[in-house]
Structure formats: C-alpha cells, structure tokens
Image: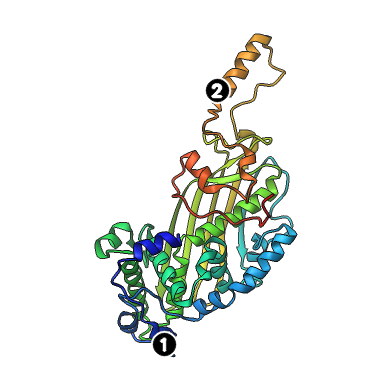
C-alpha cells in the first residue's frame, strides 16, 4: 500500500505544511473555517489527541505483539472488546442461533480500538515519520470514503457524490472533513477536530475488517474444529449529528460459509447467517454491539449425504459417490487447511468464492512464527 501510495503521490501539487504539526492549537475548539484554512489542499490531517495516541502507543503494541508471538495467541480478542457471559456462546453445537446485545469491555477503550484497527490491519503506517503518518492516513481516509456509502443525518453520500466533487483521495478526505464540520457547526459554532478525526478514522474499511475478524475468530471457537467465513456481505454506515448525539452505526449482514466435518468451504451451500450493528457513541467515547445475531446448521454446509441405511446397489453407490464429488465443484471449494495459516485467508477466499468484498489486507493474525 505504501509503495502504491508514494507512486500516486509523486507528482501531486499538494504540499505539507510542517508548521501545522509544530504550532500549538486548541483543536478541540476551532472555528468552522479553521480546517479549510489550515488543512484543505494539504496532504495531512489535524494532529489531535486520537492521532497522538495512535503514534505514541504503537511501540507498546509491537512489544505486546512480540509477547503474543511467544505465547502463540492473538493480539486482540473478542472478549477484550465486548463483555460476554459464559453461556453466550455455547460450544460444540451443530445447529444454533445466537441473539445478543454486547456492551463495551472497559479494558479496550474507544481510542485503543481505533488504534488497533490500524495497528493490526496496516501496521506499516506507523513505521514512518510523523508527517508521513498524517499523510498516509489522509490518503487512506479519502480512498475508503470515496468507495463506500454512508448516510449523514439520513442524507446519502456515495461514490458518485465524491467522484463528482473531488479529483483525488486527498480532496475526497477534505470534502468529507468539511461535510462533518458543516453538520457540527449547525449544533455548535466551535468545532472539535478530535471528534472529526475519530469519525474520519472510523470511516476507514479497517473498522469493518477488524470487527469481522474478531467475530470470525469467536465463531471459530464455538464451531471448533470447523472454520467459517462471511460470504457476500452487505454493509452501510449511518452517522447521526445532532445536539444530543454524535454517533456512528455500522450495519453488517452476511451469509456464513462453514466447513462440515473438516471438509472445505462450499459457496453453493451457505449454512448460516450473521447480522450485527456496531454502534459508536463518540461524545461519550463508548461502543457496543447493539445487535449481534448468528444462526447456523453445520449439517446443511454441503450437499445431502447418502447414508448406509439407503438400499442401493454397490454400483449405484459408486455412481452417487461420483455425482457427489462432481456436485462439490472442487475448483471453487476451499480446503479447510487453507484457512489455518493466519486466521483465515479472507482475500484469497473471497476471490475464490466470488465474494463482493474487494481484496483487502490480511485479517487479524494469530501471531505465529512461520515454520
């Protein structure tokens, strides 16, 4: 991503105003024109508290990651983000449905969760100098905002809107920042750019990526030894900005593909569903899963199995076996073994299965040394 970003930025006329990162501003209380005057048509975003947190805590994350490597475990778990009860996720059931509301685990603050979305999904960002970090983040915000759909107070802002009004990812980011600022100005003449930064960072695809990774891992735990992946998801974001609320709601629906008895993932036999609403209250710095629904039936994760109780001749059984293998269409069935390196080979998997998600960075890794 970084090399591609540098190549595209090579001939840009945008300039970085390094003085912006040195001067002291109260970025939690600025005028409506401040962003436009100081950051528009530059290639950086404001360096507020959330950006400082992400930069200053990255080395601690790396140290913790190294510890996770040694212990062969994950650097972030589902139950570190959400409070779950022992009976919320029954283990070992071949058929089940789960319907929960899960509150935030105070162990993982909103700032930490935002930071981990980038630490885990794009760690190389923080191996650069400060201004380069701000530049890459702005580029990424513009890139993701420009290809997704979201509603702000019920008004749709989609790809067509941003392509019509902007020329590149930096300008898309500027337009998005200004849109948020304009909505905020209607309820408060003083703009808190730290909150604007949080909305912008949360608008990156890293958020959906991390949350779905955490959920995939959690579902794998209850399905063990089976594995799962989302299949052809639908998602959209609602942002509410009013005198009493500053929030983001991430809506996600998808079918589930699940292995059956150690076999492969067959896209012709989705055998589960997942739906969640991840809600972020930016004013109060809290988040939750307002809705978390899963249903699955492992026995439906493939074609019907012919049992020995059925009266058929040996030759008929052979024919059925042949038909069974043909129906599986092995060219599109993904072996379960292919999912064990890392957590799940989502980009390759979704490409193979014809999923609608564009190729993205690797999922959250079970930090394990290559052998």
Q: Quick one: label 2 or label 1, which is nearer the N terminus?
A: 1
Relative to 156, does residue 49 appear above or below in the rendering?
Answer: below
Residue 326 disc label = 2
Q: Label 2, label 1: how many angstroms apart (C-alpha)?
A: 65 Å
**Rendering coords of residue 22 (x, y %):** 44, 87
How many other residues sit within 10 Å of disc 2, few (<14), some (14-19) or many (≥20)?
Answer: few
Count of numbered marks: 2
**Scheme of colours in the image:** rainbow
| Horizontal side, residue 90 vs residue 238: left or right | right
Q: Is residue 53 above or below residue 11?
A: below
Q: Which mark is residue 40?
A: none
Task: From the top left corner, tell me how far across and down residue 164 is, in percent.
Answer: 25, 61
The picture places residue 273, in percent across and down from the top left corner, at 55, 45
Quadrant in which the N terminus appears = bottom left
Q: Secondary structure beneath disc 1? A: loop
Tell me which corner region of the image, top left, top right, bottom left or bottom right, holds residue 47. bottom left
Q: Quadrant of residue 263?
A: top right
Residue occupying the point 64% across, 73% down = 60
The residue beneath circle 1 is 29
Q: Residue at x 68, y 40 (%)?
A: 94
Where residue 317 appears, as percent x and y from the top left, is 65, 14
Q: Residues within 10 Å of mark 1 (few under 14, many from 20)?
A: some
């Amino acid at each position: 991503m970084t090399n591609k970003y540098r190549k595209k930025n090579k001939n840009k006329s945008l300039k970085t105003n390094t003085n912006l990162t040195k001067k002291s501003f109260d970025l939690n209380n600025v005028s409506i024109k401040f962003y436009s005057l100081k950051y528009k048509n530059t290639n950086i975003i404001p360096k507020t508290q959330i950006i400082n947190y992400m930069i200053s805590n990255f080395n601690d994350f790396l140290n913790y990651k190294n510890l996770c490597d040694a212990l062969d475990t994950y650097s972030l778990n589902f139950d570190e983000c959400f409070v779950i009860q022992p009976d919320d996720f029954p283990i070992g059931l071949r058929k089940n449905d789960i319907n929960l509301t899960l509150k935030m685990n105070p162990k993982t603050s909103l700032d930490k969760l935002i930071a981990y979305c980038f630490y885990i999904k794009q760690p190389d960002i923080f191996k650069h100098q400060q201004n380069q970090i701000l530049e890459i983040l702005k580029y990424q915000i513009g890139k993701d905002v420009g290809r997704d759909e979201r509603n702000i107070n019920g008004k749709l802002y989609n790809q067509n809107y941003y392509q019509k009004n902007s020329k590149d990812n930096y300008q898309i980011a500027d337009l998005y920042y200004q849109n948020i600022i304009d909505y905020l100005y209607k309820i408060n003449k003083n703009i808190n750019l730290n909150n604007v930064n949080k909305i912008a960072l949360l608008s990156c695809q890293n958020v959906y990526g991390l949350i779905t990774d955490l959920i995939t891992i959690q579902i794998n735990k209850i399905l063990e030894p089976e594995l799962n992946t989302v299949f052809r998801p639908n998602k959209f974001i609602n942002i509410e900005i009013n005198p009493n609320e500053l929030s983001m709601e991430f809506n996600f629906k998808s079918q589930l593909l699940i292995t059956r008895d150690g076999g492969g993932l067959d896209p012709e036999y989705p055998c589960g569903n997942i739906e969640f609403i991840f809600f972020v209250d930016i004013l109060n710095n809290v988040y939750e899963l307002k809705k978390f629904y899963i249903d699955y039936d492992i026995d439906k994760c493939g074609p019907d199995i012919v049992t020995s109780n059925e009266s058929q001749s040996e030759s008929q059984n052979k024919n059925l076996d042949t038909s069974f293998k043909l129906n599986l269409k092995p060219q599109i069935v993904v072996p379960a073994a292919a999912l064990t390196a890392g957590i799940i080979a989502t980009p390759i998997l979704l490409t193979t299965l014809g999923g609608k998600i564009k190729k993205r960075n690797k999922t959250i890794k079970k930090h394990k040394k290559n052998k």
